[in-house]
Image (spheres, rainbow, N blue to C red):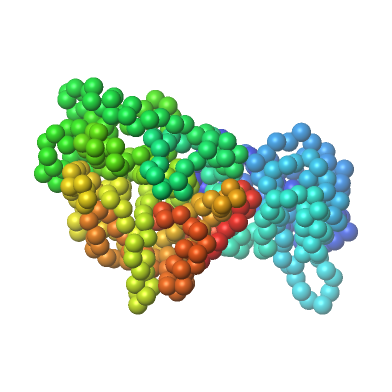
């Protein structure tokens, strides 16, 4: 059994509560209790679990007293009435996953567990006592989908906990007309737990301008190694770019920043005379999430996608559709991670398509059979929602100057795009390498946010 990524002992605590009554077939219940406990312990060595099944309210109450956890796994090892879930909810306020076991034998004889009826009793109690979502799972501990879903839930809990500890830095303000990416510290803290930090873009320009050439040798060597054709860019732009990269990287390290949303145009073109695009691309390549146009919720969307996939993500505008191929082309000026470049070209470097100064990233993104489109959206009333779509990244060359990727979606692309426009979704979407659809759905439930699944 593969371990879930990360140090679970630091990122979460989970408790296993096998509830039931002793009037059913105890040998069947005991066998499934032992298998379930073994499976859960394979994900989390410090699993909080009882030595015996909790076959009475008094046993249950005694076991959960004074426990503090991030995830409660309630399993109807046999039937149990709603008083069991009521007791759990009175003591534990964390997210709850209810696990229903399959009836082990159907032979015209005795009903051995009756776990499913117990699930309805538990669900009834939950719906009347809590306003968040009850996660549900049906199956035996040896079924693949059970193992997969448990891993997905644990991964989503980890990301939720990480967001509650993360620092997201917004550098400068969103340009006029780009307010969709603007975040308020109280809103983002209340909804996601994120600590929002802010700084003006000019401060980075000033820091960068004060660096001497010999202070940025390490950054220059890294950039030349990652960015093909960088040496063909104007020499002053090369030097100013690596100085800016050092300014960003130093600040991120000193202030323990996990993601940034940086202003880009027009300031870095008009005031600093060198774009920030290449800096953001290098940061993304180092798994420091970096969104352009100061899109804070775009950066947070990228962070979630990166944490769930363990790969850099791409933030782009939807700029073109092809009904015959059922594809959307996502594009941006040139901030993609170098590692996402097509192998036949590598991470080429160029100049900005409008301003004609560099460096910017200039390549098409590599293909992937499995991909996910994602966006944390903000409704007009201030509440949040998830856009989630399963996708495939096609093997296509660079479509426009900058960086681009062609993504095939499952739904008919034309009506899908029209609906997204009509529903007021933001014009930045995240392309994730890997299928993280189910993890995102779980995360949406954990955060009590609606998911729009395409």
Q: Nearer the viewer, residue 416 or 430?
A: 416
Q: Nearer the viewer, residue 111 or 364?
A: 364
Residue 146 seen from this side? yes
Q: Is residue 242 left or right of residue 182?
A: left
Whether 135 is drawn above or below 45: the answer is below
How many marks the image carries: the answer is 0
Residue sitting at x 72%, y 60%:
100
Residue 410 seen from this side? no
Whether 351 is drawn above or below 364: the answer is above
Q: Is residue 22 left or right of residue 221?
A: right
Q: Position of residue 412 (x, y in %)?
A: 45, 74
Whether 108 is drawn above or below 254: the answer is below
Residue sitting at x 70%, y 54%:
134
Q: Position of residue 234 (x, y in %)?
A: 12, 39
Q: Nearer the viewer, residue 241 or 274?
A: 274
Q: State which quadrant residue 61 falls in.
A: top right
Q: Position of residue 221 (x, y in %)?
A: 19, 34
Residue sitting at x 60%, y 56%:
450
Q: Nearer the viewer, residue 253 or 232?
A: 232
Q: Position of residue 240 (x, y in %)?
A: 20, 32
Residue sitting at x 68%, y 58%:
136
Identify the residue at the far front of this view. Answer: 176
Whether 236 is drawn above or below 412: the answer is above
Q: State which quadrant residue 113 falls in.
A: bottom right
């Amino acid at each position: 059994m593969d371990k879930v990524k990360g140090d679970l002992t630091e990122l979460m605590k989970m408790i296993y509560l096998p509830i039931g009554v002793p009037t059913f077939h105890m040998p069947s219940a005991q066998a499934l209790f032992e298998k379930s406990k073994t499976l859960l312990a394979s994900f989390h060595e410090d699993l909080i679990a009882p030595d015996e099944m909790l076959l009475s309210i008094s046993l249950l109450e005694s076991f959960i007293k004074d426990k503090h956890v991030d995830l409660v796994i309630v399993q109807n090892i046999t039937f149990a009435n709603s008083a069991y879930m009521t007791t759990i909810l009175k003591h534990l306020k964390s997210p709850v996953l209810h696990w229903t076991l399959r009836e082990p034998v159907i032979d015209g004889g005795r009903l051995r567990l009756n776990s499913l009826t117990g699930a309805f009793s538990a669900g009834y109690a939950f719906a009347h006592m809590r306003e968040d979502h009850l996660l549900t799972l049906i199956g035996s501990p040896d079924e693949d989908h059970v193992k997969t879903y448990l891993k997905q839930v644990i991964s989503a809990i980890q990301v939720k906990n990480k967001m509650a500890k993360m620092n997201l830095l917004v550098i400068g303000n969103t340009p006029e007309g780009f307010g969709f990416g603007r975040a308020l510290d109280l809103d983002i803290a209340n909804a996601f737990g994120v600590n929002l930090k802010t700084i003006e873009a000019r401060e980075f320009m000033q820091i960068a301008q004060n660096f001497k050439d010999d202070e940025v040798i390490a950054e220059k060597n890294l950039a030349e190694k990652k960015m093909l054709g960088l040496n063909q860019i104007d020499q002053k732009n090369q030097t100013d770019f690596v100085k800016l990269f050092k300014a960003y990287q130093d600040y991120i390290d000193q202030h323990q920043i996990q993601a940034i949303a940086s202003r880009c145009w027009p300031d870095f073109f008009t005031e600093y005379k060198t774009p920030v695009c290449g800096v953001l691309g290098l940061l993304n390549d180092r798994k420091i999430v970096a969104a352009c146009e100061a899109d804070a919720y775009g950066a947070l969307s990228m962070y979630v996608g990166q944490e769930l996939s363990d790969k850099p993500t791409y933030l782009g505008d939807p700029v073109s559709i092809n009904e015959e191929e059922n594809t959307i082309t996502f594009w941006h000026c040139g901030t993609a991670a170098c590692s996402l470049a097509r192998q036949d070209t590598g991470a080429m470097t160029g100049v900005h398509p409008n301003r004609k100064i560099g460096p910017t990233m200039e390549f098409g993104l590599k293909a992937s059979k499995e991909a996910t489109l994602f966006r944390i959206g903000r409704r007009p009333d201030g509440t949040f929602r998830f856009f989630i779509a399963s996708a495939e990244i096609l093997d296509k060359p660079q479509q426009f100057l900058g960086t681009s990727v062609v993504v095939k979606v499952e739904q008919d692309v034309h009506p899908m795009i029209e609906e997204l426009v009509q529903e007021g979704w933001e014009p930045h979407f995240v392309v994730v390498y890997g299928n993280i659809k189910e993890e995102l759905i779980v995360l949406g439930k954990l955060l009590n946010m609606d998911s729009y699944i395409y």
